[in-house]
Image (cartoon, helix red, strand yellow):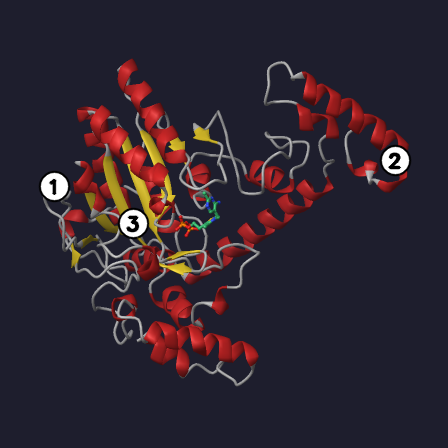
Amino acid sequence: MAVAMALTAPSLNFGVRSFTRLSRLSQRLFSTAVIRYQQEFTTLEEKPQFPGASAEYVNTLEFIQPNVISGIPVYRVMDRKGHIVNPNEDPKGRISFYMTNYGEEGTHVGSAAAIEMQDLVFGQYREAGVLMWRGYPLDSFMAQCYGNIDDYAHGKQMPVHYGSLEHNFVTISSPLATQIPQAVGAAYAYKRSDIDRAVICYFGEGAASEGDAHAGFNFAATLECPIIFFCRNNGYAISTPTYEQYRGDGIAARGPGYGIRSIRVDGNDVFAVYNATKEARRHAVSENQPMLVEAMTYRIGHHSTSDDSSAYRSVDEVSYWDKQDHPISRLHNFMINQGWWDDAQEKAWRKQSRKMVIETFERAERKLKPSPKLIFTDVYDTAPPSLQKQEEQLKKHVERYAEHYPFDKFERF
Ligand SMILES: Cc1ncc(C[n+]2csc(CCOP(=O)(O)OP(=O)(O)O)c2C)c(N)n1
């Protein structure tokens, strides 16, 4: 078990921090739920190890009917060594694209490839691959993260809260799960317009505990909306592991309770994600029905730069997913097995990508920040008197105390 592995980990020295970690681990040890949480990783070919569910792998693409409520299997196309389990599902020629990320790339790149460009995307914040797939430029990613003059939102949003009208990607909202009922509303509008468009709505298993998720699922089912609910079950909501998040069989098990057809998929298998999402989209649009895809994966990175996940999970656990069940390694193995990729190409590609990213970073860094007056734009068509007053006050303030502000880095007020 993870607990046993963590106890033998070299990082377990005596000291206050280690003691705290030990206490947390022993609390887990005595929790009954921990038994389901993590098994010992002995071979590559055992049961799925996702902390969010206890299930078997299957290689038949089958949506769960609303009256089936337990034992949901995990669909996959290729095994951990990149071998296709069922030759009929060999995806040659269907996907030829992948990008680096932190262990969840299979979920968002696989699903993005399976939907149509006209489909509207509501993301959570960990789905940059969807935008990449749609051609959102690297410079725009950087501009948003830097909040510079090229940022579409003029620096009003937190970094990684991307949005692009051109790419049918609704701007990310920080409050969890608010995107779910909004996405359902958009899908309902599509249904009423009778056009070939679907909505895909991404969320984490943590966000699925919010009331908005319930409201969204139920509206989508009763109003029969063409929407794909795409849950990335990555095992953690910041520091909350799935065994503290829910006691049922993950998120897919909830679909039948709402009358929503559901499937659980190996999120580290980009082909399985692609197939499941493609099929979900087909049903969603042709039958005006919501579909639920639960993609089992693992958050290899910390939750954010403000988080240090070593406080609540073992280094060995993270290392297992990074080294032994990584979606990019799997695709890499598959491509090597096909003779489509080799170490020299990999090396050259990495070098070229790194150079491109660093150059883009530098360009974004050198750009000016937007004028402070833009704080007051883009929300109201005509700013209300209270905001107009604040704008005047700010202007006077910065004129008076100009020497305290780095105005050389900003566009003029
Ligand atoms: C309504 C609300 N509550 C709490 C937060 C703080 N918060 C931000 S991310 C997060 C965890 C979400 O976990 P999950 O939905 O599983 O997604 P993941 O980060 O694992 O991708 C929390 C609790 C928030 N942003 N909004």
> Which amino acid, by three-letter code, is at mark 3?
Ala
Residue name at image x 25 percent, y 74 percent: 43
Residue 144 position within the rendered picture, expressed as x and y whole percent measured from the top left: 59, 38
For residue 260, side relative to residue 27 (left or right): left
Distance (Cα) linking label 1 and label 2 = 64 Å
Label 1 and label 3: CA atoms lie apart by: 17 Å
Q: Nearer the viewer, residue 59 or 413?
A: 413
Give the numbered dot on residue 65: 1
Classify mark 1: helix, strand or loop.
Answer: loop
Q: Is residue 371 visible?
A: no
- Which residue corresponds to mark 2? 402
Q: Earlier in the sequence, mark 1 or mark 2?
A: 1
Task: Label 2, secondary structure: give it.
Answer: helix
Quarter where residue 123 is shown: top left
Q: Which residue is mark 3?
A: 295
Left or right of 168? Residue 367 is right
Q: Number of callouts in the render?
A: 3
Image-quadrant location for residue 6:
bottom left
Q: Amino acid at mark 2?
A: Ala
Whether label 3 touches label 2, CB < 8 Å: no
Q: Nearer the viewer, residue 219 or 164?
A: 219
Looking at the rendered structure, which numbered label has been put on residue 208?
Answer: none
The residue located at (33%, 63%) in the rendering is 325
Tell me the kind of residue under disc 1: Gln
Circle 1 or circle 3, nearest the eye: 1
Disc 2 residue: CB within 8 Å of ligand 1: no
**Residue 187, x across and y down, in percent:** 31, 25
